[in-house]
Amino acid sequence: MTDLRELREGLRAAVRGEVDFGTTARALTTMDASNYRRVPLGVVAPRDADDVAAALSVCRTYGVPVVPRGGGTSIAGQATGTGVVLDFTRHMNRLLSLDPEARTAVVQPGLVLDRLQEAAAPHGLRFGPDPSTHGRCTLGGMIGNNSCGSHSVAWGTTADSVRRLSVVTPRGERLRPGQAWAGAPAGLRELAEGELARLRTGFPELPRRISGYALDALLPEKGADVARSFCGSEGTLGVLTEAVVDLVRAPRARALAVLAYADETGAAEAAAGLLEHGPLTVEGMAADLVPAAADLPRGGAWLFVETGGDTEGEARARAETIVRAADVLDALVVTDPARQRTLWRIREDASGTATRMPDGTEAWPGWEDCAVPPARLGAYLRDFRGLLADHGLRGSPYGHFGDGCIHVRIDFDLLTGPGIARFRRFSEELADLVVAHGGSLSGEHGDGQARAELLPRMYGPDMVALFERVKGVWDPDDLLNPGMLVRPAPLDANLRFSVLPSKPVDVAFGYPSDGGDFSAAVRRCVGVAKCRTTSVSGPAVMCPSFRATGEEEHSTRGRARLLHEMLAGELVTDGWQSTEVRDALDLCLSCKGCRSDCPVGVDMATYKAEFLHHHYAGRRRPAAHYAMGRLPVWLGWVARTRSAGVVNGLASVGPLARVAKRLGGIAEEREIPRVAGETFTRWWRGRKAVVPSGAGAGAGAGEGDGTGDLVVLWPDTFTEHLSPSVGQAAVRVLEAAGLRVALPPTLRPGGRPVGDGRSRSAARLLTARRGRVCCGLTYLSTGQLDHARTVLRRTLDLMEPVLATDAPVVVLEPSCAAALRTDAPELLHDDPRAAQLAARVRTFAETLEQYAPHWAPPVLDRPVTGQTHCHQHAVLGDTADRGLRAAAGLTGELSGGCCGLAGNFGFEEGHYEVSVACAEDQLLPAVRQAPDGAVVLADGFSCRTQLEQLAGVRGRHLAEVLAEALG
């Protein structure tokens, strides 16, 4: 048995990079994007090839397996192992050189594909293969799996773009595989030349034949290309440390033809016929993977066919030629790059979207990328659908139709014995079906554990025996990734779900999309790792903490992995009390970006609140949870005692402010926001105006005609105590639009009208219950869920008169609106009033759009800058806001990302640097680069505070901008 202490110390002595045998590092690498899970002994992040050789030497001494790992997005299980994982993403992640003349680049294995594409783009070049995970997959992983992507019909697989490799063998030999037997290990040439007949006849001719070792690349007529034969070896032959890759000339202009067909079979049958026109892509997907709001031509399935040219007109002409040649129901040709990106995002997100059936049932990989000859694809899909039906299974095929490669997630039951037995039977029969159609078990992602056991059905036992002999030449000690490709583990062993609790755990939230099962919610993360992208475009948010730190544990996937291990109890053994999970969640901003940007809708903000609720049950919490988590209490006390001036004065005295921040767990670098001298509701009551007819007692008056619909304006904590000017501006605009504005009740006498709740009767006052509405946001974000429930139930009691009307509830603070719309009904899943209130919640712009559709806002004709609030993006949507801005002549786009303050997060001690880094990701650069005279929009109080404290810029709510323009 391996002495872990000796192994760890031996690695630390030999390797200059990090050696981590801690629980967190191991938990983060137990899984990739497959159905499989293995617990490693430790993780090594090598700095260079010398470190790799040293690590291999130590592991060989102790007989410990080694698994090379890049982005961890493999879906066949080959990036997991029980020994030492080599993580190349931390240090060996550079582009070493790029030669535009030779059209080559020298890369390290941990380099993310998008970084190479960004460097090549200014030279009019690109790397040809581009998997949908291009924002986080690494070149080493692509070479290990021989990845392809959507442009393979034009530029082939990764093996077609590899010129030369640098490899360290398990016994420490440094090789440079290339053509003409360059870099071949001793014995490989003799072995191959003794099997020439088998190599010439044993491999099907397919554009996407990825299964097994590519030994036919060693044939003399194919240049005896050792580098090409190494591609797709899944880390089982040697460890890649460097690669020389070819680049291709990128077309100057592109057009995207979206071709609509009645069903996927029709699209599949048409795909092969389009190849003669030289498209760059021929991608297919069916309606069950397409969002309802997607702007696609009418049909039940679509081909995404991209064409290129030197000019937009040339690219469009080629696309239109394809449209004319295709027998379609409908078609769309797009040349605008932004719209093309939007359409491509639909296709790229399918790898995550497919993990849920339309009814919410879970679906899993395992048969993610079989490939058949393109001309056989239609027939294969019909047979495939029949096989699914025979086994009572469902799946949604999509993928690279032009290459005959199909991705699909299937609703396997991988939790029970009978379900797993059916998974095996189906896998065996599907392997036979693929072979019958002349196909390959893997057409992109490799065999791993998912399919290697079935390779004899494709190649026969003699060829598989030859694979084992080749493995023995490269790796005689079976050190590298054992159990993959040769001598494989059974396809139904090591399933990652087997360690999870068989019964739902007791939790606070309802998890309505997961049947109330927290384990099912955590299972949502399938590892496609969209959260690990280092840059975002457009309005995307996820995952700001990962972009700030670059650490896997601070990504949505990393946190989900730790929660998975917490539920499993094997590696993380202290359950809800886990410090590893707590520390990983500590830098989660609760921005909710993952709720919308994650293809499978992981909601880490909710999971964090759930965890904190259990973690601190009956225990003392961090000071910030009391100081900021109960902010409504403290601000309410200030308002009742009318002590805002005193509080602000004390906060302005440096020594006192430092003491207060230290006691409250607030970062020393932060300024304490000023409390308003007059609250919003006190201003409301003091308005000297006529009450609009029918608005309700104490509703107040406005400048509008008062003839429109009644709307109830929510006085959230931030608007009430910290930014009453936002509420005042909203009242002006809403009333200018002809709406009647009221505030929620503060008393609950029976049958009271909607208004501010002031009673005319002393007797009624005696029986009324006084209070103020609150969304519970600060309690939710700090995991004080018992307090949140109490606050929300009191709020629902107060809001009953409002719920008895048809009035919408206008919430100005996006985070509060999001809490009411999603968190409240999910936490109070046993109280139907929470769902009723959620259905009433409207943003400021939504209210004007729906209840004052004929009102025209003042026209400002000014550019805007700023950031769409992360909760607005993730939960509420900003379509109405865009429309309102356009109507007001406010031009330009707001950035994505998160401001980094994120409620209490950026104020908490220890979070300041990450908070600033998040702001520097999108928000602050956007404001600095804004044109002169731009309006800085920031609907969230946190966003405005961050702008003021970090950039000295005053951001304004859209209501304030419009109110000012009213004159």
Image (cartoon, helix red, strand yellow):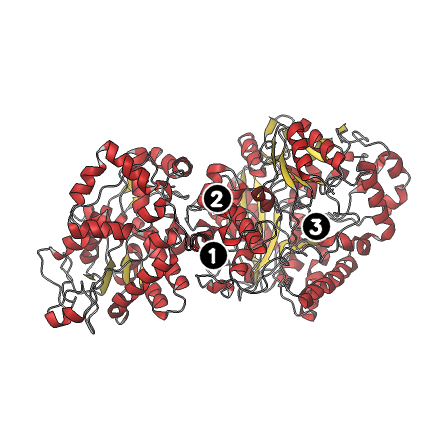
Q: CA gap, disc 1 to disc 2?
A: 42 Å
Please state which of residues 910 and 756 is positioned toward the viewer in this rendering.
910
Rendered view: 275 above or below 231 = below
Rendered view: 76 above or below 850 = above
Q: Earlier in the sequence, mark 1 or mark 2?
A: 1
The quarter of the rendered structure image containing the N terminus is: top right
Element at label 2: helix
- At label 3, the amino acid type is Gly
Q: CA gap, disc 2 to disc 3?
A: 39 Å
Give percent across and percent down for residue 38: 66, 49
Element at label 1: loop
* Tag nearer the camera, 3 or 1: 3
Q: Disc 3 marks which residue?
A: 443
Give percent across and percent down for residue 947: 31, 38
Q: Disc 2 marks which residue?
A: 583
Q: Disc 1 marks which residue?
A: 295
Give percent across and percent down for residue 479: 76, 39
Quadrant in the rendering for residue 867: top left
Task: Give the side of residue 471 with respect to residue 651, left or right.
Answer: right
